[in-house]
């Protein structure tokens, strides 16, 4: 009997371990063939993509601050602003064809591209034999990747991580037979570089990025990539090896370790980037000294110490939030196989939990550098002309990257984007004046880059206005500043950083608005991001006046600036002007199909199922439309989403998950979430499709396709939005809980007002909740038809039962 009990106990422990691993680990039983199968690591600045080959390992390296280009030319001469009046006149005549043509005059240069640093190669001298028991995995619980296999009875192991506290990429290699480890380390790059090794046996790679790189979507063209040894961002990659036994030999291009048992490779990376407004060649940081100092400091620490320091730093962020769902049998399968099974309809709730936490992992790993947010691919990119330049696409993608940070208890990771907005405002003042003829405030367009480019892109007239001529980038971005204040209550941040930027964006919009024929305030010219209208006479275009998206973003910006000015007791005159303007903004309109109109008039869309849904901004991420307060507008948003359907790109699915959650339809939100977890073949295994279709690559990267990280972040944000929603006034528990998530728990997620919450639910009903007050504010909690309002003390936790009664 005891033996049976012991066997059952062991089986239960194994099952629990497998369950825990299935929620924090993605693994493969083979090396990666393609980038979209690699295991990615990062410390918010240095990125590494691990292939894990047996005879030859490749690791793509990136640095968040290594971009093509130079600071924005503030002395640029353009006559763009002189064309605004004639565009407005054409629109007043309802001459959309002329307005479309004239709008091309309101364009400047394209943004620059995020650059790949290079590839670290490790060549192994293994004995003859077929590898067995191959394993390549990433544990997002400690941000460590591992590779293991055995050849002829010898077990070979590798561990990889990128340390934030020690600023180095670390690879630890070992083997089970003394002296069986022999390998060489090399470096290659598409950038300009040279290598050398000194007496200290450090391999030193120094080089520089292009001073210009054209967007890849412009196709092959002369001077698409321009290198100049006197221009561009400098980089250094310094490598050394600490080893147990064996002999290390350094040449000018290679480090070779022979007959060792254990070794640790230290990789230190630095660039000369010294801010968006400093020339990286003439005013840059000393990248060589930085790389050398980082390596020297890290080299004094052994592998165990480096790993402990890395894990302690990482888990202090990652472990804030835990999420579990009641699940059946846990499949012990490689991640690509689990993803395929999930695509076919098999239940794997632990995969859904893993995907949520993977979004948090990617955020911690890609967003810890001041003024340098996570880009379209986070910090992981192997292409010198990457898709859409890996830039900051300000008409949705850059913002979607940061939807999860506050609610997912990663507020610090928001700061790279929030500080970047300050950079954008500096160049945006020039954009406002020279491109739009507005002397007050600042504006930003569709695309930006590390240099805080803010002008409308398009190469001075070659861009299509449908994407090139949008100017609400700053208006949208500043809403993140107010959100950060709402979650943290940080008055110093609001007073000294957020409010001046919010004010500047509001002042631009106030000056940009004009009256329509009925006295309403509208934008002119206007577009709705990347979508086109069809007029009754058959004209297809993008340029109009008073797009719903523009006005929704302005309404949100104005309302937040008004509230911020009240909190700070400042700028009463501006506040009055903004309040009067809000009252005169052209209101939302419901079309003949019951949809929320995207255009000033009730026009058809050229593409009804278009991936963008910018006119629904007021529903999410804004707070203007809710089922409770504006039921007719909420119903119109629902109809709009029904018309659009569910088939769309990865990032768009991420947005629609959140929109459906705000409509309190958890089952529809979950349907899209599940479709987001649809297996997509790696780009290299098929012809790259930029048209979209949405899904997930084998390594859980979001597929637009191609890879864009915003879908990962939007999907993770959507999970929280199903489980917890908050406004400035109220916290709603389990507002859009899907039926399939019958029982589960989550802890550590955050709500506006400065609250941290934990919840448990069983059979679809809340069983308990805890509210920790971080700011001491009044708290109003809702669950279904019950509400509870209570005063809180800073730092105190309040336990609630299913009836929303405080338990003492």
Image (spheres, rainbow, N blue to C red):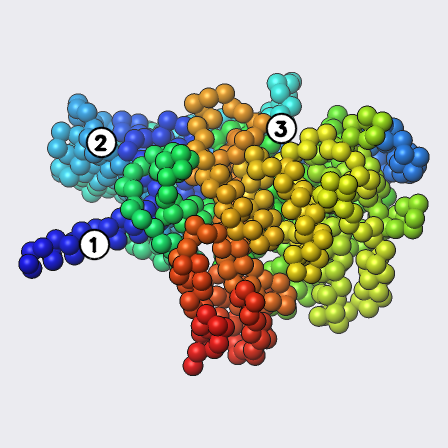
Residue sitting at the far bottom: 808
For residue 703, above or below residue 492: above
Residue wearing tag 3: 215
Residue wearing tag 2: 182
The CA distance from mark 1 to mark 2 is: 41 Å
Q: At 88% from the left edge and 51% from the top edge, which residue is drawn?
A: 520
Marked residue nearer the N-terminal end (2 or 3) = 2
Query: Dot 2: within a 10 Å radius of its alpha carbon, few (fewer than 14), some, or many (20 or more) residues?
Result: many
Residue 575 numbered mark, or none: none
Report x, y in % for residue 528: 73, 39
Q: Observer-nearest residue: 64 or 37?
A: 37
Marks 1, 2: nearer the viewer: 1
Query: Dot 1: within a 10 Å radius of its alpha carbon, few (fewer than 14), some, or many (20 or more) residues?
Result: few
Marks 3,1: beta carbons within 8 A: no
Q: Observer-nearest residue: 753 or 780?
A: 780
For residue 345, above or below residue 352: above
* Residue 534 placement, left or right of 200: right
Query: Dot 3: within a 10 Å radius of its alpha carbon, few (fewer than 14), some, or many (20 or more) residues?
Result: many
Q: Observer-nearest residue: 630 or 236?
A: 630
Residue wearing tag 1: 12
Marks 2, 3: nearer the viewer: 3
């Amino acid at each position: 009997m005891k033996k049976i009990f012991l066997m059952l106990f062991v089986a239960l422990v194994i099952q629990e371990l497998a369950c825990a691993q299935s929620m924090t680990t993605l693994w493969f039983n083979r090396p990666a063939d393609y980038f979209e199968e690699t295991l990615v690591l990062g410390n918010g600045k240095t990125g590494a993509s691990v292939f894990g080959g047996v005879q030859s390992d490749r690791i793509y390296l990136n640095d968040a601050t290594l971009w093509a280009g130079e600071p924005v030319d503030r002395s640029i001469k353009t006559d763009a602003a002189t064309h605004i009046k004639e565009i407005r006149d054409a629109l007043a005549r309802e001459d959309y064809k002329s307005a479309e043509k004239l709008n091309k005059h309101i364009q400047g240069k394209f943004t620059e591209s995020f650059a790949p640093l290079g590839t670290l190669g490790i060549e192994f001298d293994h004995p003859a034999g077929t590898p067995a028991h191959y394993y390549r995995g990433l544990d997002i619980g400690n941000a460590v990747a591992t590779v293991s296999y055995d050849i002829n009875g010898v077990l070979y192991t590798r561990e990889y991580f990128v340390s934030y506290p020690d600023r180095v990429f670390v690879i630890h290699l070992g083997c089970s037979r003394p002296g069986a480890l022999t390998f060489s380390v090399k470096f290659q790059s598409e950038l300009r570089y040279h290598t050398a090794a000194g007496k200290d046996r450090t391999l030193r790679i120094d080089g520089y990025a292009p001073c210009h790189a054209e967007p890849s979507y412009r196709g092959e063209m002369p001077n698409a990539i321009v290198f100049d040894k006197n221009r561009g961002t400098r980089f250094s990659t310094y490598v050394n090896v600490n080893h147990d036994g064996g002999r290390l030999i350094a040449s000018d291009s290679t480090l070779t370790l022979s007959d060792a048992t254990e070794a640790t490779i230290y990789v230190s990376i630095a660039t000369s980037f010294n801010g968006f407004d400093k020339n990286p060649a003439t005013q840059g940081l000393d990248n060589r000294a930085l790389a050398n100092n980082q390596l020297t400091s890290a080299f004094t620490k052994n592998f165990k110490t480096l790993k402990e320091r890395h894990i302690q730093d990482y888990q202090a962020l990652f472990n804030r939030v835990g999420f579990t769902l009641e699940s059946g049998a846990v499949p012990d399968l490689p991640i690509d196989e689990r993803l395929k099974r999930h695509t076919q309809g098999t239940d794997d709730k632990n995969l859904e939990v893993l995907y949520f936490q993977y979004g948090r992992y990617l955020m911690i790993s890609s967003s810890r550098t001041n003024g340098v947010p996570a880009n379209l691919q986070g910090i992981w990119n192997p292409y010198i002309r990457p898709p859409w330049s890996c830039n900051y696409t300000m008409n949705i993608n850059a913002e979607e990257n940061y939807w999860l940070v506050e609610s997912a208890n990663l507020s610090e990771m928001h700061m790279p984007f929030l500080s970047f907005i300050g950079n954008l405002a500096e160049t945006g003042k020039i954009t406002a004046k020279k491109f739009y003829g507005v002397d007050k405030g600042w504006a930003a367009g569709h695309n930006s880059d590390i240099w805080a480019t803010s002008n409308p892109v398009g190469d001075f007239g070659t861009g299509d206005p449908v994407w090139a001529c949008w100017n609400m980038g700053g208006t949208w971005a500043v809403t993140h500043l107010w959100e950060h204040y709402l979650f943290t209550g940080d008055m110093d941040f609001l007073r000294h950083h957020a409010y001046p930027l919010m004010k500047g964006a509001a002042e631009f919009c106030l000056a940009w608005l004009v009256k329509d024929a009925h006295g309403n305030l509208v934008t002119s010219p206007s577009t709705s991001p990347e979508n086109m209208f069809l007029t009754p006479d058959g004209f297809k275009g993008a340029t109009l006046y008073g797009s719903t998206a523009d006005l929704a973003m302005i309404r949100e910006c104005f309302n937040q600036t008004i509230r911020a000015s009240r909190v700070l007791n400042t700028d009463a005159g501006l506040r009055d002007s903004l309040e009067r303007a809000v009252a005169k903004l052209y209101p939302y309109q419901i079309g003949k199909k019951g949809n929320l109109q995207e255009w000033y008039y009730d026009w058809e869309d050229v593409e009804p199922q278009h991936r963008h849904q910018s006119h629904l901004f007021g529903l999410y991420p804004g707070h203007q439309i809710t089922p409770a307060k504006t039921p007719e507008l909420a119903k119109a948003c629902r109809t709009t989403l029904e018309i659009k359907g569910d088939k769309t790109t990865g990032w768009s699915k991420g947005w629609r998950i959140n929109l459906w959650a705000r409509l309190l339809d958890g089952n529809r939100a979950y349907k899209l979430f599940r479709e987001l977890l649809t297996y997509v073949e790696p780009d290299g295994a098929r012809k790259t499709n930029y048209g979209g279709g949405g899904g997930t690559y084998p390594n859980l990267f979001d597929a637009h396709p191609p890879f864009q990280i915003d879908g990962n972040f939007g999907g993770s944000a959507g999970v929280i939005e199903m489980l917890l929603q908050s406004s400035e006034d109220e916290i709603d528990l389990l507002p859009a809980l899907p039926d399939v998530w019958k029982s589960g728990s989550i802890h550590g997620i955050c709500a506006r007002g400065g609250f941290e919450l934990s919840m448990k639910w069983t059979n679809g009903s809340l069983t308990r909740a805890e509210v920790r007050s971080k700011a001491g504010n009044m708290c109003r909690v809702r669950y279904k038809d019950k509400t509870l309002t209570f005063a809180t003390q800073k730092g105190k936790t309040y336990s609630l039962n299913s009836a929303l009664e405080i338990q003492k």
